[in-house]
């Protein structure tokens, strides 16, 4: 091969995704340029040294305390890219499961939408072969193309379904204020507990079928779903809003303005307070188990980890109603309800530069008639 | 008059002049930069379209991962936008943006190779491109066998048409190192491609 051939190959050889990458990047670059242009150049030149001095003073003034470290992480990490009006390719592999009161959908990696049916809440099976979905008084197991594999009917409304990890032979769900468990083939439905709070129960990974749930009295109870034994209970300071077992074998609870972690046997391990001004109602534990993303009605999307300060992943005003990590842990999907957008933020721990990808008019894309309220992101499964 | 041409000092002086003398900038590009500095999004978009393909391809051929190349090139353009009002519009835009791209791509490729040493299976499973997105002809395979620094000089020389002196300045290495890396890279490419031909 001579130099001319090498030149030609480097310039002309098709590179996968070149055009799409350019379109995505142009949107982000345009938005950044517009934001920069809002401040006149002369003012920016004058302001920049002053900002540097102010930032140094702020860093010096806050550098001695953990709160100061938190503050430093909060400086200068805002990016508000122009959202794409079309839900195109997901930034990472796998499929999103979303639900609204008007139905549940699967979003495929190429942006294709598949309506599962009139389900109001849903969750993936461990390998994404099925979704468990609730509608009125009936619980369904459906394939990703919408085919119903089985269903069971109950006297009262059902919801908050959760399929067990591993081999996936159990499904937990709430019927009114009762917690029930059914086998993965739809058989053996039985009551496990009464007076439970409207919080999706969380299966412990590993051997056996151990389930944690929140009671209406604000306790966390962990019990063996097979023989009903209570393994441990805990009482966080506030009523739990969400529970999840991490890959590291810790139960993570979002309760009030705190993220709490418990060992397998219920020993309290860590209590991570949310930064001031952050209100969280949803969380997503990173697949590695090393950090937790939280969001809610104020303060944007935050990442909390055991050994470091809170990090702002996305700064957006208003309410967020769903978070899910991509299966490879490199991207976080957040439902930004107030803006009608889905925001995909690359994990700060992932290799490469920071990136944010946003899609707007989500409800209209699910239903062009506008009859669908903003959908909640239920899960991101299985690349 | 005592000329300096031909003397060591003269060569140094000429080299210095070359280093500081801006390359000719097409008037249209200069106008686009100025307009973008004054807030014109259309001008910025035109600049982007002019330089994105080379920036993306440069990153891709160094890191061999389309998603990472997109991230690297995107971050370079964002950095350029943030620094646009300080940019001297008499200078060409391309070396500026591509220098950022290439250096970040080398960093990325280096860090990825380090991660592979400590967890090859994990890194491979997390970063392997989709089969459909794989470019797997002989040249790409041969390029992949080079180290990131060698790939970078090949890309700068043969994709972006930079001179060895420009490459040396962009990568902060001596010009002799550029030449030797280029030579070794081309020898290696030729050997691999001949080997492939031999296999039929």
Image (spheres, coloured by chain):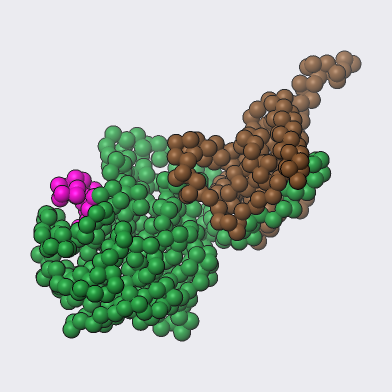
Chain colours: A green, B brown
Residue for point 51% across, 49% down = B127
Can I make out residue B25 in this image?
no
Could you tell me residue A168's position as x and y percent? Answer: 30, 63
Q: Nearer the viewer, residue B27 or A118?
A: A118
Q: Horizontally, is B96 left or right of A242 in the view?
A: right
Residue for point 14% across, 72% down = A191
Q: Horizontally, is A153 left or right of B63 in the view?
A: left
Which residues fall within the magenta stretch? A250-273
A171 shown above or below B18: below
Could you tell me residue A228's position as x and y percent? Answer: 12, 63
Q: Horizontally, is A33 left or right of A217 in the view?
A: right
**The C terminus of chain A: image quadrant:** bottom left
**The N terminus of chain A: image quadrant:** top right
Can I make out residue A175 in this image?
yes
| Residue A268 lies within the magenta run | yes
| Image quadrant where residue A379 sits | bottom left
The secondary structure making up most of the magenta span is: strand
| Residue B154 lies within the magenta run | no
């Amino acid at each position: 091969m001579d130099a001319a051939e090498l030149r030609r190959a480097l310039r002309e050889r098709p590179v996968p995704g070149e055009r799409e990458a350019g379109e995505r990047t142009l949107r982000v670059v345009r938005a950044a340029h517009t934001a920069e242009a809002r401040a006149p150049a002369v003012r920016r030149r004058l302001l920049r040294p002053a900002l540097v001095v102010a930032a140094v003073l702020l860093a010096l003034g806050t550098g001695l305390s953990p709160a100061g470290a938190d503050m430093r992480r909060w400086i200068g990490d805002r990016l508000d890219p122009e959202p794409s009006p079309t839900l195109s390719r997901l930034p990472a592999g796998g499929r999103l499961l979303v639900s609204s009161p008007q139905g549940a959908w699967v979003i495929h990696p190429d942006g294709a939408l598949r309506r599962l049916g009139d389900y109001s809440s849903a969750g993936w099976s461990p390998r994404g072969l099925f979704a468990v979905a609730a509608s009125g008084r009936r619980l369904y197991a459906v394939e990703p193309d919408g085919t119903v594999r089985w269903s069971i009917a109950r006297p009262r409304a059902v919801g908050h379904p959760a399929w067990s990890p591993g081999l996936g032979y159990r499904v937990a769900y709430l019927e009114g204020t009762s917690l029930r468990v059914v086998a993965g083939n739809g058989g053996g439905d039985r009551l496990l507990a009464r007076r439970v709070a409207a919080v999706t129960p969380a299966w412990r990974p590993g051997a056996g079928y151990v389930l944690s749930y929140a009671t209406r009295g604000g306790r966390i109870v962990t019990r063996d779903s097979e023989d009903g034994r209570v393994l441990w209970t805990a009482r966080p300071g506030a009523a739990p809003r969400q529970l999840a077992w991490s890959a590291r074998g810790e139960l993570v609870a979002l309760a009030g303005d705190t993220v709490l972690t418990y060992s397998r046997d219920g020993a309290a391990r860590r209590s991570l307070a949310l930064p001031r001004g952050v209100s969280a109602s949803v969380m997503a534990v990173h697949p590695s188990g090393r950090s937790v993303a939280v969001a809610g009605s104020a303060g944007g999307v935050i990442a909390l980890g055991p050994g470091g300060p809170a990090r702002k992943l996305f700064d957006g005003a208003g309410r967020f109603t769903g978070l899910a990590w991509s299966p490879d842990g490199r991207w976080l999907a957040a439902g930004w309800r107030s803006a009608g957008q889905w925001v995909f933020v690359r994990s700060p721990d992932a290799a490469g530069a920071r990136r944010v990808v946003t899609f707007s008019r989500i409800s209209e894309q699910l239903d062009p008639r506008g009859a669908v309220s903003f959908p909640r992101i239920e899960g991101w499964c299985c690349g | 008059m005592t000329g300096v041409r031909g003397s060591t000092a003269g060569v140094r002086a000429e080299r210095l002049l070359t280093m500081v003398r801006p390359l000719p900038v097409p008037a249209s590009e200069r106008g686009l930069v100025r307009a973008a500095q004054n807030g014109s999004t259309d001008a910025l978009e035109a600049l982007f379209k002019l330089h994105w393909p080379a920036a993306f391809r440069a990153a891709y051929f160094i890191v061999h991962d389309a998603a990472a190349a997109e991230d690297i090139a995107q971050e370079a353009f964002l950095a350029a936008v943030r620094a646009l009002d300080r940019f001297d519009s008499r200078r060409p835009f391309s070396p500026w943006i591509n220098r950022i791209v290439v250096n970040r791509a080398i960093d990325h490729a280096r860090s990825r190779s380090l991660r592979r040493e400590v967890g090859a299976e994990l890194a491979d499973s997390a970063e392997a491109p989709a089969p459909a997105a794989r470019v797997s002809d002989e040249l790409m395979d041969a390029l992949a066998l080079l180290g990131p620094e060698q790939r970078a000089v090949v890309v700068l020389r043969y994709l972006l048409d930079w001179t060895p002196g420009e490459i040396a300045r962009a990568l902060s290495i001596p010009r002799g190192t550029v030449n030797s890396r280029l030579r070794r890279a081309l020898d290696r490419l030729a050997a691999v491609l001949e080997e492939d031909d031999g296999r039929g």
